[in-house]
Image: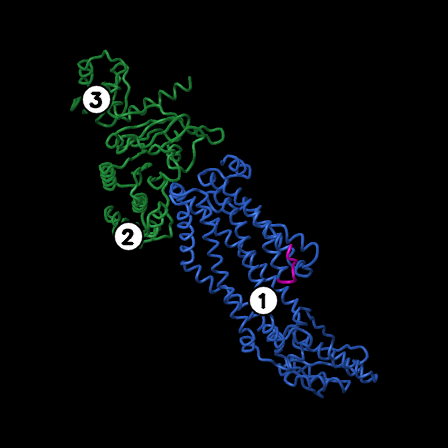
Chain colours: A green, B blue
Amino acid sequence: MSIIKVENIFKSFGNYNAVNDISFKVEAGKIFGMLGPNGAGKTTTIRMITNIIFPDKGNIFIKDQIAGPTHQNIIAYLPEERGLYKKLKVIEQLIYFAQLKGISKQTALDRAKYWLHKMGAAGWENKKIQELSKGMQQKVQFISTMLHDPEIIILDEPFSGFDPINTELLKSIIIEMKDAGKTIILSTHVMEQVEQLCDDIILINKGKAVLSGDVRNIKKSYGKDTIVLEFDGDDSFIQNLPNCRIISRTQNRIEFKLEDNTVSSKQILSTIMETAEIYSFAKVEPSLHEIFIEVVAHENMKKEN
Amino acid sequence: MNTKSKIWTIISHEYLSRVKSKGFIIGTILAPLGFLAIIGISVLVTVMSKEDTSKKLAIVDKTNLIGAKIVALDTSKYFITDLPVETLKKQILDGTSDGFFLIPADFMDNGKAEVYTGGGGGIGYVEALENNSEEILIREKLYQLNADPTIIKIVERGVSIDQKKVTIEGEKEDFTQIYAVLGYILGFAIYGLMFAYGAMVMRGVIEEKANRIIEVIASSASPFQIMMGKVLGIGMVGLTQVLFWLLLGGIVLASGGTIASMFITPDPALTQGMAGQSNPNEMINMLNQINISPGIIIGFIYYFLIGYFIYSSLFAAVGSAVDQEQDAAQLQMPITIPIIIPILFITNIMANPDGTLATVLSLIPFFTPILMIVRIAATSVPAWQIILSVVLTIGTFFLCLWVASKIYRVGILMYGKKPSFKDLAKWFIMAK
């Protein structure tokens, strides 16, 4: 069942077309990744779903109803740019945001305590926001979006500003939410996280959807011809490989693709062994990172021609 | 889900977070104390400067008439001396004398005299000396010329005109001047309050935008609810403060006579010296008799609130347009100018509250809040004008609110370049 249906929406600001005919569906109880380069129209799309702005054309349905102010209370939105009242106490801040979502003060208070404890922030209630570090503020911000027990959770770059430990904590909470039946929209530039968390994705570029669907199917459709190599020694073998496109390259690891797929693995391996020692060699599905770059580069080239 | 409860949540947040702050509590209590202190100090200064000239002057009287009478006015300041002028001059140089007043023999004819001191001491004592000797000179001259005693009396007393106001209950003492001054104070108070609270709204909007709070709130409530909630919440803060001050003012006025008489001891000599001018006794008397009608108080509250609403919605629009307070200066101009203009006319209107200028200006909705209260306090404004002003200001408020909310809706999500008036116009058209 799709909980959100976006049908042919358009939004322009003056002469600038921020969103140009986008359609997609978000399935209930799944994690939906919204990807795209900066300025692609992701935030504008999210703002239309959260009823902050309205489409010029097209419709957004939430639970089969035209999206409107009534849906704001079942949606949680964590914007990319975070903001809290600096002079308020943590607990006052949390209660105010929860009350704005239609939650009573007492319920908000109980849930705030629960979440502060869960996020390792117990005892912060009476601290002023301005006394908190950036990472602590991010936690408070995240908690503030959760107190009304939302059905739909929209997270825009939720991991930014978190250290690795808190990133893992947040990931586990997101998965916990999904298990509890919540629908999550995740917008991020970190493709690894998308691969780890998302069921479906949409890739937006210049206001248009350029790719969408199930993450696994998308990767499958790109075939198993990406080579991941771990090695020791000189990487000059790359110049000897015909039509080699490097996707990522570090000291001892290289991810690449040969445009000419008639070259056999044996030929490739022997070329490499001339200069380096191989630790591992694998033909894999492309990473989302690769797909992202390929699709966006391709689209941008198409536009220029 | 429930728009009423959302806007109420915003109102109570805006209200409580401000009213509970230390700044507000201290400001509310200290402002009247400051006001009283200023009045108190100016009264004290006046009283002290009248009473005290530290100089004690010797009087050398060649007329053998005037000198003794001056000394009789105040023996603590003057004394007659027979010493020669040269000796007196030496005494000044020695520091044994403050100075001396030399009345020449022909003083009675040309009124010219000289005072010698070691310099300094201000001009207060000279003024006192001039007044005292002039009074005596005139009186003595009239006696010399055998003038009619009634003329002497008139000269001594001066002219005083009492203002009486005809009302249904009969004649009353009329304190027109006092009421005009009251209007002036109330007009200025509204001016200050509109500015202070308008700016508070603007700062609140900028805070939410600059700290990126607005996007979070906008995903919970509509921009109109957010703006209205802020305007109403802060308006209630203003109302709280005004009501507190009015209550305090009421208490002070009710017991004003008593309090004033505690501070100012009526001094007959002093009263005599300032004949005809305002003196403490008269002030106490007036404080006891002035009665501020409920009309003035209701008018003050109404015009403060409507003025605040008109301007604060516009301040909110300006706040929504900028990313930081420093950028707001230019965009504020069209709002601050109409607030300041009435202040330029306030004295004229005080002087002639029934004139055409007063009537016309006080009916221009942007000027009404400040100018109408001046007129209401100073004169009896015809009912139709008051009703018209209420209709016009409410209409203007809705117009401003409509324009402001359209700009606000777009402005709060616009970051980056500093907007121009052209941008605001674009946003206004852009907003549905």
When the figure is inspected, residue B24 is found, relative to residue B253, above or below; the finding is: above
Quarter of the image for the C terminus of chain A: give it: top left
Residue B44 in the image, given as x and y percentages of width and height: 57, 73
Q: Is residue A114 left or right of residue B83?
A: left
Residue B282 pos. (x, y %): 63, 75
Q: Nearer the viewer, residue A48 or A252?
A: A48
Indicate the position of residue B365 as horizontal and vertical percent values: 60, 50
Chain letter for mark 1, please.
B
> What span is in magenta?
B377-384
Which sits earlier in the primary sequence, circle 3 or circle 2? 2
Q: Position of residue A208 (x, y in %)?
A: 39, 25
Q: Where A154 sits versus B232, above or below? A: above
- Quadrant for residue A243, please give it: top left
- Do the residues at pointers 3 and 1 share their chain? no
Of the two numbered discs 3 and 2 in the rendering, the one whose residue sits closer to the viewer? 2
Please state which of residues A169 and B129 is positioned toward the viewer in this rendering. A169
Specify whether disc 2 shares its chain with disc 1.
no
Q: Which residue is mark 1?
A: B292
Res. A124 mark? 2
The quarter holding residue A69 reads top left
User: Marks 3/1: CA distance?
Assistant: 89 Å
- Using the rendered image of the protein, determine whether residue A141 is visible from the camera's viewpoint: yes
Question: In the image, what residue type sits under mark 2?
Answer: Trp
Q: Foreground mark, 2 or 1?
A: 1
Which chain is disc 3 placed on?
A: A
Please name the amino acid that badge 3 sits on: Val
Q: Residue furthest front?
A: B168
User: In the rendered image, which residue does mark 3 sit on?
Assistant: A284
